[in-house]
Amino acid sequence: MATYKVRELEGMVLAQAVALAEGLAWRVDSRLGEQAFQRSFAPGSPGFWGMYMPHASWSLGGPLIERERIGIAIYERQHGENPPPDSMRWIASMEMGSDHAHAGEMLLALGPTPLIAAMRAYVASRLGDTVELP
């Protein structure tokens, strides 16, 4: 297992973290040479195996953003602040749920795209600032 900072997650490692937060099973698909995730409609029900990239696909990330009520905006510098690097141009925000230690507080995450920022916010809300992945 390796420990990752959620604010730095990207690519398939971010997809794996979102899958973990969503409770999805995953495996490496040797035909694709990438990780594939099982999407199920209920725990234990048969699903289908396929690429799960909510950080790159609005059809996968969009419903999650809507369900979790994640706000997304362009990150603009504040007066006197240095401009953000290109790798952190978008900001995502969401209110922490009642089951979280910081219930009612706003969680913020940055990313190079709206989907990456939103998925980082979601993972942090469910798993914390760091995540352990195989």
Image (cartoon, grey):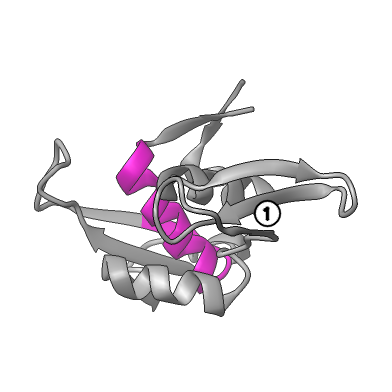
Q: Residue furthest top?
A: 1
**In this rendering, position of residue 37 left or right of residue 116:** right
Answer with the quarter of the image where residue 21 lies.
top left
Residue depicted at x 29% and y 65%: 68
Answer with the quarter of the image where residue 47 lies.
bottom right
Res 75 seen here:
no
Residue depicted at x 41% and y 48%: 43
| Residue identifier under label 1 | 11
Q: Name above or below for residue 66 compared with residue 121.
A: below
User: Could you tell me the amino acid type at mark 1?
Assistant: Gly
Instruction: Check disc 1: other Cα within 10 Å, few if <14, some if 14-19, many if 20+.
Output: few
**In this rendering, position of residue 34 left or right of residue 55:** right
The magenta stretch is 109-128
Q: Secondary structure at mark 1?
A: helix
**Viewer-nearest residue: 63 or 130:** 63
Q: Quadrant of the C terminus?
A: top right
Q: Is residue 18 magenta?
A: no
**Viewer-nearest residue: 43 or 129:** 43
| Secondary structure, magenta segment, majority class | helix
Q: Name above or below for residue 13 compared with residue 51.
A: above
